[in-house]
Image (cartoon, rainbow, N blue to C red):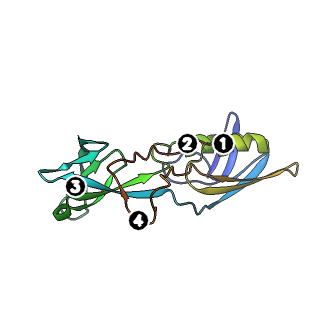
């Protein structure tokens, strides 16, 4: 895509639905990105109320999950209706009703996704490595950014909001959801 207007003249690659250029160049600099390899998602085993699967035990008390209905339109078929439930840790991915357990995903970048739009806005208008760095500070998911200016300056950033983890637990296994509140990302900006 090529975007040209007051204060912006940028060309490169973008994603549908995301305004701006994510990888590209303007009149002052060029940049690209690769995916990082950080582990940003933990799975929590939520202890369910045997009498109501939409209630879970957390920090000494039973709590109601937040649930909503979603309808997925299917071309040539009946709409698919599903229920999406969340705990303090994140959305429930799987239910094991006989064991009274639900598995919820906690992502470090949850609630920070719009930072990519802020970053893209700054990248598109950046004139210096320092201005580009201000944009990179908004990236919450694991990405590496590389930039080079017309003046020969170069820069590299590994952008991520690391997952806060209780050191007592092994993140390779589902974590007990009864006491540890993920808390989301650690803001390293």
Residue under numbered circle 3 = 82
Between marks 2 and 1, how big is the CA–CA gap? Answer: 9 Å
- Mark 4 is surrounded, within 10 Å at the Cα level, by few (under 14), some (14 to 19) or many (20 or more) other residues, namely few
Residue 149 percent location from the top left of the image: 82, 49
- Mark 3 is surrounded, within 10 Å at the Cα level, by few (under 14), some (14 to 19) or many (20 or more) other residues, namely few
- Please report the residue visible at 50 percent of the width from the left and 48 percent of the height from the top: 109
Residue under numbered circle 2 = 115
The first of marks 2 and 1 along the sequence is 2
Residue under numbered circle 1 = 135
The first of marks 2 and 3 along the sequence is 3
Residue 141 percent location from the top left of the image: 55, 52
Labelled pair 2, 3 in contact (Cβ < 8 Å): no
Residue 175 percent location from the top left of the image: 38, 58
Q: Secondary structure at mark 2?
A: helix
Q: Secondary structure at mark 1?
A: helix
Q: Is residue 110 above or below residue 78?
A: above
Q: Secondary structure at mark 4?
A: loop
Between marks 3 and 1, how big is the CA–CA gap? Answer: 37 Å
**Mark 3 or 4, closer to the camera:** 4
Along the line of sight, the residue nearer the viewer: 167 or 121? 167
- Please report the residue visible at 32 percent of the width from the left and 49 percent of the height from the top: 178
- Please report the residue visible at 47 percent of the width from the left and 45 percent of the height from the top: 184
- Mark 2 is surrounded, within 10 Å at the Cα level, by few (under 14), some (14 to 19) or many (20 or more) other residues, namely some
Along the line of sight, the residue nearer the viewer: 20 or 189? 189
Q: Which mark is residue 173?
A: 4
**Mark 2 or 4, closer to the camera:** 4
Specify the quadrant that holds the C terminus.
top right
Residue 12 percent location from the top left of the image: 66, 54
């Amino acid at each position: 895509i090529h975007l040209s207007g007051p204060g912006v003249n940028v060309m490169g690659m973008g994603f549908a639905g995301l305004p701006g250029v994510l990888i590209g160049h303007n009149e002052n600099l060029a940049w690209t990105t690769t995916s990082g390899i950080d582990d940003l998602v933990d799975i929590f085993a939520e202890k369910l109320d045997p009498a109501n699967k939409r209630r879970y035990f957390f920090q000494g008390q039973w709590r109601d999950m937040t649930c909503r209905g979603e309808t997925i339109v299917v071309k040539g078929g009946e709409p698919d209706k599903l229920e999406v439930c969340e705990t303090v840790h994140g959305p429930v991915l799987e239910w094991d009703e006989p064991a009274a357990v639900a598995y919820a995903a906690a992502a470090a970048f949850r609630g920070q996704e719009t930072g990519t739009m802020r970053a893209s806005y700054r990248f598109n208008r950046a004139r210096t490595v320092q201005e580009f760095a201000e944009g990179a500070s908004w990236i919450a998911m694991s990405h590496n950014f590389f930039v080079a200016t017309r003046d020969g300056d170069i820069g590299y950033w590994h952008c991520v909001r690391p997952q806060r983890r209780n050191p007592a637990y092994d993140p390779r296994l589902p974590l007990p959801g009864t006491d540890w509140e993920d808390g989301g990302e650690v803001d390293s900006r």
